[in-house]
Image (tube, rainbow, N blue to C red):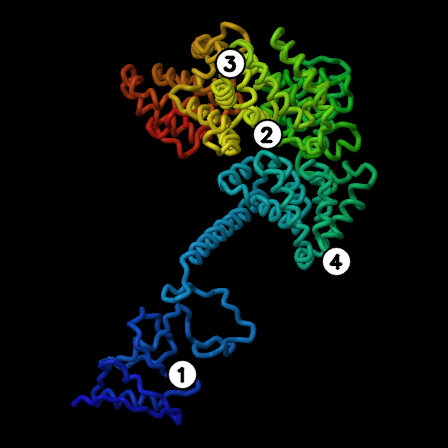
Amino acid sequence: MLVKDKGFQTVNGVEEKSRMDFSEGYMSNEHQEQFRSASESADPYSVSPLQISTSPKSPKSPRSPRSPRPQQGIHSPLKNQRHSQSKRDGRPKKDGCGGKGTWGGLIDTDDDCFLDLNDPNYSSNEEDKDSISKKTNSSFEEYKKKAIIIVEEYFANDDAISTANELIELEMPCYNYYFVKKLVSIAMDRHDKEKEMAAVLLSSLYGNVIDPPQVYKGFQKLLESTDDLTVDIPNAVDILALFIARAVVDDILPPSFLTKAMGSLSKDSKGVEVIRRAEKGYLSAPLHVEAIERRWGGSKNKTVEDLKCKVNNLLIEYVVSGDVKEACRCIKDLNVPYFHHEIVKRAIIMAMEKRHAENCLLDLLKRASEEGLINSSQISKGFGRIIDSVDDLSLDIPNAKVILQSLISKAASEGWLCASSLKSLSLQSRNQAVEDSTIKSFKIKIQSIIKEYFFSGDISEVSHCLESEKVFSVAELNAIFVKKLITVAMDRKSREKEMASVLLSSLCFPSDYVVSGFTMLLESAEDTALDIPGVVEDLAMFLARAVVDEVLTPQQLEEIGSEFSGSDSIGNRVTRMANSLLKARLSGERILRCWGGGGSCTNGRTIEDVKDKIGKILQEFESGGETREAYLCIKELGMPFFHHEVVKKSLVTIMENKNERLWGLLRECFSMGLITENQMFNGFTRVAVSLDDLALDVPDAEKQFKHYVERAKAEGWLDTSFGVNASEHVLENGFCK
């Protein structure tokens, strides 16, 4: 007989309503008796009162190991209602708080709470943020574990090259500051040998593997954690001060770091003691450089200070003798290619201090670059280090920033420095308002400079005149020159337009100056149209040509277009037309030929001529020519924006002749910075587009091409996302999408 129970039950004096009072809930007499005995034996202080629930069945949560197991054969309809919908464990905590039905501890927080899909306040955005945060934290935790392993392996094998490769393979440059911090903190608790090894490693990784801001941030984090370091390392203040002093001596930290770091620390912090110790105890001492370098004995036969001394003596002797050949031999004998940035840095600083020796020192660097003795990466790194410390140089060299900008411009115009690889040189005068009288007089002067250039075609003379007017140090004057040059050229013939584009590419103005110049051009385009009816077509062609010549990037073209959102404005029409020109198939060659010059102010030099020269250079090299000679011939073409043709012709020749000698030439050109990653991408893309035609002569062309694409990816020439199918890389901006 079934009895419907709607009454109340008393358990140890505590009255509670029976849970059987729900829709259609029935229980047999046998079950009622078993339930009553179980309730009477329960501890009222450890079990919360049963609650009536009419909600749908919720998912089962894991059974607590301490809860009593129900007897076999008993199927209580209450078991599904005893579990909370929360994913948190309802068992009491060991300290007596936080159990189910309690208020938790006095200082409990819900940091480890879980999102409940049944919660009426649930939002999917919370889950997205939580997943992103967990992903970021997991990647950083993974980096930290690997960084510790890399540091320990380095101290075990003393292999800086292997350490650099492992850091690069992590592909997490944004966390490299932690590697700096961990490397130094571990070395601080080791012997002098490990301390010296850590200092040498940081110097070798600086710039190439670890960016300067990451080094800066790493030492800043060390200063902030000095209080914790002193707990385990009693003399942590002195050791860290010596590390910072060593970093300043090795030029991986600017001297201004001490002042800036001091301002970010609290006065009672141990980090303040570290800075004071580094500044007064080490960097202010007589002959401090030698004392700091030899403090840990040195783990190498050649210390950094010895090399610096040799470089300095080499440059002094060269300035006196003027023997370029002997100076190059001495550089080669040093046998420290990873340290050539120091030669560049000291040569440029010497040129800034001794203006009479400027041409002599620049000739040495140019010769070393042409012979492949100093590669483009080391040259860029040397200039970059000077830019980082130019504020300190200004204390000893008046107008140091202006002089440095002039030297950068000269090096870029001569072709041995890639100015686009450098950070912009922050000149104080950039933000200073230029007086109206100065602008008026400057406009009159550049009018004559531009007319003289169109008559003579002498780019070096233009650079010299602009330098004398201190144009390179003022952003507004640079933009005015760009605007005036193109405005005058638009009112002339194709020859002058070609010469204007070549001059704009040769002067190597910082790209933001060029952006400002074109923006000013478009803003005044309506007035210009009154005198030049075809202003829209001409300006669009100049913009497209600037992108093809790599004076502007496609992103900067979009930036210029965003300034003119009105559909009826001339600026909007110009930028839309420029984009259309760049999206056309093989538009790069057409744009280069648009004014008949093919990328050179010398009449008659067309794209076909350049292609023919490239073909002859590669043919001569394949038949037994020297790599260095082929490298110099490609460089002397003076068309870096057309080096994709070298890549394309080399790949086609390799696939046709089954001769990989040209692959070695491509490797040399890429390692020396002559062929950029962008040009490699463009060259491989052009081969991918023409695979169908190539297959008529080379049946296995597609198979070979896939093989060489994988090799290029392995050697770092191509991004891993590069595809073999031509449809994946539509030709757009003259060369590829």
Of callouts 2 and 1, the N-terminal one: 1
Q: Residue at x 49, y 34 (%)?
A: 565
Q: Quadrant of residue 583?
A: top left
**Nearest to the observer: residue 418 or residue 541:** 541
Whether residue 377 appears in this view of the structure is no
Instruction: Give coordinates of residue 121: x percent, y percent.
Output: 42, 65
According to the picture, the residue beneath numbered tag 1 turns out to be 47
Q: Say which of marks 3 and 2 sits in front.
A: 2
Residue at the right extreme of this rendering: 286
Q: Is residue 137 above or below residue 549?
A: below
Instruction: Give coordinates of residue 294: x percent, y percent.
Output: 74, 39
Of callouts 4 and 3, the N-terminal one: 4
Quadrant in which the N terminus appears: bottom left
Of callouts 2 and 4, the N-terminal one: 4
Category of crowding for the residue at label 1, using alpha-carbon neighbours closer than 10 angstroms: few (below 14), some (14–19), many (at least 20): few
Category of crowding for the residue at label 3, using alpha-carbon neighbours closer than 10 angstroms: few (below 14), some (14–19), many (at least 20): many
Q: Say which of marks 4 and 3 sits in front.
A: 3
Going by the numbered disc 1, the residue's amino acid type is: Val
Q: Describe the element under mark 1 as helix, strand or loop.
A: loop
| Disc number for residue 512 | 2
**Nearest to the observer: residue 511 or residue 451:** 451
Q: Is residue 161 above or below residue 525?
A: below
Of callouts 1 and 4, the N-terminal one: 1
Q: Residue at x 50, y 79 (%)?
A: 96
Left or right? Give the position of 502 relative to 702: right
Going by the numbered disc 2, the residue's amino acid type is: Asp
| Disc number for residue 599 | 3
Q: Quadrant of residue 269?
A: bottom right
Q: Is residue 384 above or below residue 261?
A: above
Of callouts 1 and 3, the N-terminal one: 1
According to the picture, the residue beneath numbered tag 4 turns out to be 268
- In three-dimensional space, the C-alpha distance between marks 4 and 3, rounded to whole angstroms, equals 63 Å
